[in-house]
Image (spheres, grey):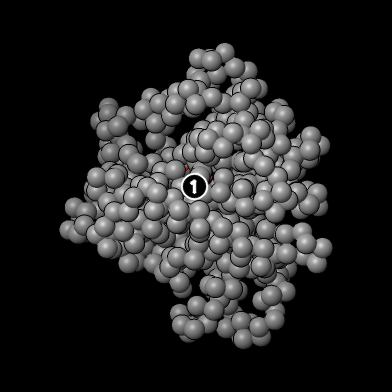
Amino acid sequence: MKATEVLADLKRRFPNEPEYIQAVEEVITTIEDTYNEYPEFERYNLIERLCIPDRIFSFRVSWVDDKGQVRNNMGWRIQHNNAIGPYKGGIRFHSSVNQSILKFLAFEQTFKNSLTTLAMGGAKGGSDFSPRGKSDMEVMRFCQAFIQELWRQIGADTDVPAGDIGVGGREVGYMYGMYKKMARENTGTFTGKGREFGGSLIRPEATGYGNVYFLLNMLQTRGIDIAGKRVAISGSGNVATYTAEKLISLGAKVVSLSDSDGTVVIPDGLTQEQMDYVFRLKNIYRGRIREFAEEYELPYHPGERPWQIVDCDIAMPSATQNELDGDDARALLKQGVIAVSEGANMPSTPDAIKEFLAARILYAPGKAANAGGVSVSGLEMAQNSQKLSWSAEEVDSKLRQIMADIHHQCELFGKESDGFVNYVKGANVAGFMKVARAMMAQGIL
Ligand SMILES: NC(=O)C1=CN([C@@H]2O[C@H](COP(=O)(O)OP(=O)(O)OC[C@H]3O[C@@H](n4cnc5c(N)ncnc54)[C@H](O)[C@@H]3O)[C@@H](O)[C@H]2O)C=CC1
Ligand SMILES: O=C(O)CCC(=O)C(=O)O
């Protein structure tokens, strides 16, 4: 396999899908040497079969708003690869959603899920519908219409969706309710469900907590303590808030949060009281981070991201793709950042990644660092199959172990001769090898 040729061909076939091409490029350039050690992979044209999704469902979603006006959105589900288990991955509702973004997310999910050590293939879905500014009833009607289109393609052992940007417990509940009604079954074909109907304890916290556990594993390799470290976080949604909560409990200082409108800087570090306010603001009132800044008279920077305006030791981008570019990376490095651990999927641009690797800081790509969310989703599936529910302590301890195992796999496949761990290469090669072996064993499909 020549990565440049594979990429040129994918660009020709999918010319309008830049995010998808970006994600593929990062993976195949790092696995190229390993791939070429196995001539049978080439004969089976494994690389193309791994890059191009198994199938894509796309559909129109028509729903009625509160004024009685009919509205139309697009919906998609990308079933990327099910070599190691049922398709699995979140659903994103955001006005920016398109096929390219969902294809990149489903591609990344395949390698991430492989790293979790659990039996899950990769998928992603979503819509260009934005829940922002919509009433509860509008969100419910949209979710129901979305599932009326999708329900035949998903199932507990086929394809198990969950949340992502714009999809939290409320949206999962509405979608699961309609799924159950259409499919006439109660088998847990969604994760991130409410606790009363099969949701796992710790699933809401899992992506943020898992990212912090991964960070602790990285810091340990250099004998660095998290206590007292200044951590810049972007976003203020599910991943960002639970990352912040865990960091506070460990004595770190969270010095920023943000949303798509701007960034709040917290020079003395977020307190637990402020954290509770943010949880209420985001989950109950569905407000903006500017309102938090106003409430506590903190500096607010409209239209800005945290990276060039805060003073920090560690960065944890937890909002969206390509939110941290080369200039941001250079600014972070200039002020001596020691670690970057990604809560979001593909938040760093290729230019930024190049800078982090060249500076040999601890840099964890999302597919390793944020795998805690889907891992606990896998544990939710296991509990649903058993018709049991595990304690928070049990789930949390399994999550810690999974994050440690992912860290170990990254070290195994990413350690260079001088001892530096390239977590990008480690995660990609480890994730790839498991999927590749499973695909080879199951024939041409
Ligand atoms: N929820 C989960 O379990 C997992 C989520 N992720 C990733 O973490 C990231 C955040 O997801 P969630 O916290 O679940 O979503 P969320 O909807 O709860 O929060 C998203 C946050 O990002 C901000 N944001 C969205 N688009 C933005 C943009 N264009 N510019 C600046 N800020 C923007 C929003 O204002 C919000 O604060 C996404 O990249 C997602 O794919 C990754 C693994 C699991
Ligand atoms: O929990 C899941 O199934 C998916 C989580 C997710 O969307 C992700 O890992 O990016």
Q: Can see residue 232?
A: no
Say whether residue 181 is left or right of residue 119: left
Given residues 372 and 260, the one toward you in this image is 372
Say whether residue 165 is left or right of residue 379: right
Q: Can see residue 116?
A: yes
> What residue lies at 74% left-to-right and 39% top-to-bottom?
337
Pointer 1 residue: 207
> What residue lies at 73% left-to-right and 64% top-to-bottom?
415
| Residue type at numbered disc 1 | Thr
Placement of 426 over or under 349, stated as above or below: below
Question: Residue 444: x percent and y percent?
Answer: 48, 83
Q: Judging from the image, what secondary structure is the residue with disc 1 in?
A: helix
Query: Quick one: quadrant of the C terminus?
Result: bottom left
Say whether residue 221 is left or right of residue 320: right
| Mark 1 close to ligand 1, CB under 8 Å | yes
Say whether residue 362 is left or right of residue 50: right
